[in-house]
Every structure is written in C-alpha cells, then in structure tokens.
Image: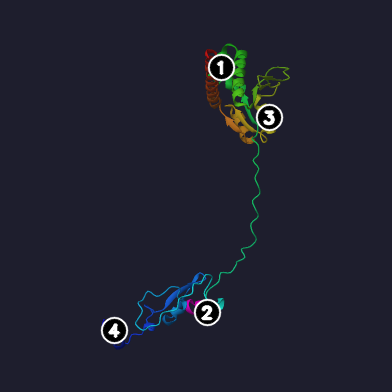
Amino acid sequence: CHNQKQVVAAAGYDPEGDLEHTPDSVFCAHGGGFSVKWDQVPQYMHLESALPKQRGEDPAPVPRVYTRNLDLDEKELEAIFLRTFGPQRRREYQFLGQAAPAAPRRTIAPPKQQYLIVDGYNMIFAWDALKDLARENLDAARQRLMDILSNYQGYKQCRLVLVFDGYKVKGNPGTTFDYHHIHVVYTKQDETGDMFIEKLLQEIGRNYTVRVATSDGLIQLSALRAGVLRLSADELWREVEWVGRQIDQVLQTLNQKGRLSRDS
C-alpha cells in the first residue's frame, strides 16, 4: 500500500489495543517466557533485527551475548510474570502420611515330603491283572502288588505305605516290614485297614503332602476330613502304567549307550 500511514490513520487502528495481533514480543529467561513492549525490544535482543535499516538511521549497537542470564534479577522477572500471566500457584510439598512399611521378605518353604498310602486289597480286586491272579493265589497277588509299587516308588521317590487288612486273623498282632523301600503293614486283629489308614492320616496329614489311593468310600471320607488328596484305584493304575513306560524308556536308552560303547 503506497499510502499506508494515511489508511491506518483514517481507520483509527491502535496496534496496542489489538489483543489478537499484539505488537509485543515474548522473550525467554530462566525457563519461562515474558512479554516485552514493541518499543523495548532492542533492549532485550540477542541478535540483530532482520528488518532492513532505514536511511539515516544510526547503526544499532552490537548486542551483548549473555552466557548466564539476562540483566534482570529475580524480583523483576517475577514482576513481569505477574503482569503477564497473573499470580502463579506454586506447588507445595504435601504430606502424604506415614510411608507404608516395607513388605516382609518371604522365605520359600522347602517342599514337604510326599506320602502315598495304598489300600492293598482294594487295588488287588480293582486291577484286572491282580484280580485274576488273586482268584488263584492271594499271596501271589499281594507279592505282585508289592513289586509293582516298589518300582513305582523308585521312580517317584515318595514314601509309600501299603496297608493290608489283617483284622479277621485270630491272634494276629499285626506286622510291619519294609520291602524294597516301601513300608508294608498288616493290621492287627480287630483293626481294619480303614481304621489304620484313618489313624495314620490324623498323625501325618497336616505335616506332609499325603495322597490316599483307594476306592473305598469310608477311607475316602477319612481322607476328606484329614484334608489330604484322594486317588481312586483306576487313577493309581494309570500312574503305574505311565511310570512303567518311563522306566522302559530309561532302560532302552541305557542299553543303546551300552551297545554303542561296546561297538566303539
């Protein structure tokens, strides 16, 4: 516009009254900004103005480079901030109450010894392989059961108690003995296997990890009252079969290594 001054004068435009397009500048100091009037800008400039100089205008003095801060003290800056942004709310330290105590260190308890208590006659007459043998020879069926469970114990490394009823045998004082790391019990006269197992559960059920293998309802009820795990005859037989397969694999691996060592 060739007659800019006349147009502005005729319009009555006041740059300082224009709040949307203020002629002021914003400078930064101490991590905050403050407003500077247009006619005071040269006092705060660090760099030369990019506007072309008019003829006859004195060259601007070389600006001073401030390496630490502006020539304003804290009170002046605070006054500028107050005029520009209004009162500032300072974050106060808040007392959040007493710190929560550190959680006590937890120690991992060692695993409990595992017990398996087996109702002997219940297994014999529930497992088909032993049931047929018991019809011919009960002693042979008991012996076969002890052999099966001794292999099972050797692989599982639990404490195994095998209980047989002896309450019908007159004058029977009861018998206990160890057979290949399993503990075999024949109950005494007038003491059923149920009674012995229930008494044993009361003694060890709270201190060890105990399972009872039986399909007898009374013994399962005793196990429930003692808070121990119950295992049916079928479930134990499936475990026995699985252990047998694992043992066969170990033996096959050992045999293969033996043949390779001999061939080499």
Image quadrant in which the N terminus is located: bottom left
Q: Nearer the viewer, residue 241 or 227?
A: 241
N-terminal of the pair, mark 3 or mark 4, is: 4
Q: Secondary structure at mark 2?
A: helix
Tell me the CA gap for discs 3 and 2.
87 Å
Could you say where residue 236 lies in the image, as x and y percent from the top left?
56, 25
Disc sitting over residue 4 in the figure: 4
Q: Nearer the viewer, mark 1 or mark 2?
A: 2
Which of labels 3 and 2 is toward the front?
Answer: 2
On the rendered structure, is 231 left or right of 208?
left
Which of the two discs, 3 and 4, sits closer to the camera? 4
| Rendering quarter of residue 222 | top right
Could you classify mark 3 by the number of other residues whose Cα lies within 10 Å: few (under 14), some (14-19), or many (20 or more)?
Answer: some
Q: Are marks 3 and 1 in contact (CB under 8 Å)?
A: no
Distance between the alpha carbons at the discs numbered 3 and 1: 26 Å
Q: Of the residues shown, which amino acid type is indicated by label 1? A: Leu
Please tell me which residue lies in front, 78 or 171.
Answer: 78
Q: CA distance from mark 2 to mark 4?
A: 37 Å
Expressed as whole percent of the image width and height from the top left, the position of residue 243 reads 55, 23
Mark 2 or 4: in front is 4
Type of amino acid at the residue the image marks with label 2: Ala
Q: For mark 1, what is the residue? A: 130
Residue that mark 3 sits on? 200
Q: Secondary structure at mark 3?
A: helix
